[in-house]
Amino acid sequence: MAEPLSARDIAIVIPALNEALRIRDVVEGALAQCPNVILIDDGSDDGTAERVADLPITVIRHPPRMGKGAGLRDGFAEAMRQGRHGVISMDGDGQHSADDIPRLLEAANAHPEHIIIGARLRKRSRQPTYRRLANEFGDWGIAIACGFRIADTQSGQRFYPASVCSLGDIPGEDFVYEAQILISASRLLGVRCVSVPIESRYQAATGPVQFRKSHFRPLRDLWRITSHVVGQVLAYGGLAREYRITRATPVIVFDPSGEFAPSTPDMRATELT
């Protein structure tokens, strides 16, 4: 049996575009949990990289903006070059808490060769309604393309095993890439997803600015994701067939604390571990 993964065995990959507001807090939080942090500065013009220039991390800079997909590709490649056994991705805007990293790593050890998703299932009332509805719609489509149900396919806080990081040139850019990597891992490697409940963290309607406005645009990005995914579903055998397969394969939620209680119809059939 392989040795359990430790924080030293993995890398934290943080794609960032104009994240000067929170990037230092994000990187320092990641370093507190893992010594191997890779920041991809995707053409920022607000001094993002300069905010962390004195910290012991690897910085990859894209002089022109290339998109989140390119950032993740380059981060994965660098982590594999360093000999890491997996990657945890985090967004640079502070939406993800570094305190959840040990829980994702625990889930990765409990479910080897799975993608672990930090699913925003706790305190969902903090999530703007339009974002929650967009995420639920995205979950439906991407799950059918993967062949199994998934909680929070849009979360950017994930653990990817080395086998997934090494898949190569996965098609798609920006948020489409994050959808496609789930599909490719499932179809090419037979890799399933496990969701770990985390809190939703968003800018409050009033009070000081804590998080910058999301780069995700529901109408634009959901259209890109949906149009990308539908063609693949049809190629795999048709929408009705793939839908039946997906509905028969419930979400896997790793929640050893027992705090999470499924409450929505789609989550009542959840496999809890």
Image (spheres, rainbow, N blue to C red):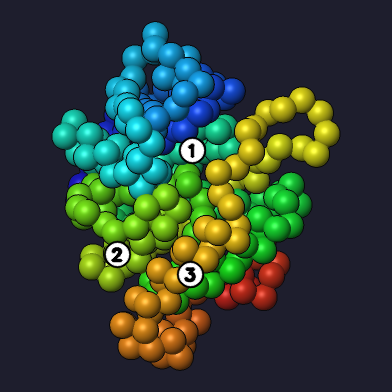
Amino acid, disc 1? Asp
Upstream in sequence: badge 2 or badge 3: 2
Instruction: Look at 40% across and 44% down and name the residue there.
Output: 68
Residue 272 percent across, percent down from the top left: 53, 64
Residue 216 percent across, percent down from the top left: 56, 49
Upstream in sequence: badge 1 or badge 3: 1
Q: Residues within 10 Å of mark 3 (few under 14, many from 20)?
A: some
Amino acid, disc 3? Thr
**In which quadrant of the rendered view does residue 178 lie?**
bottom left
The one nearer the camera, 99 or 164, is 164
Q: Secondary structure at mark 3?
A: helix
Residue denoted by label 2: 184
Rendered view: 83 above or below 117: above
Answer yes or no: do the residues labelled 2 and 1 have beta carbons within 8 Å?
no
Instruction: Look at 47% across and 44% down and name the residue there.
Output: 157
Q: Which mark is residue 226?
A: 3
Q: Residues within 10 Å of mark 1 (few under 14, many from 20)?
A: many
Instruction: Look at 49% across and 38% down and name the residue there.
Output: 91
Instruction: Look at 28% across and 44% down and name the residue there.
Output: 73
Distance from the alpha carbon under mark 1 to that under mark 3: 22 Å
Distance from the alpha carbon under mark 2 to that under mark 1: 21 Å
Distance from the alpha carbon under mark 2 to that under mark 3: 16 Å
Q: Is residue 107 visible?
A: no
Residue denoted by label 1: 91
**In which quadrant of the rendered view does residue 55 lie?**
top left
Answer yes or no: do the residues labelled 2 and 3 have beta carbons within 8 Å?
no
**In which quadrant of the rendered view does residue 31 lie?**
top left
Q: Is residue 124 visible?
A: yes
Q: Secondary structure at mark 2?
A: helix
Upstream in sequence: badge 2 or badge 1: 1
The one nearer the camera, 171 or 132, is 171
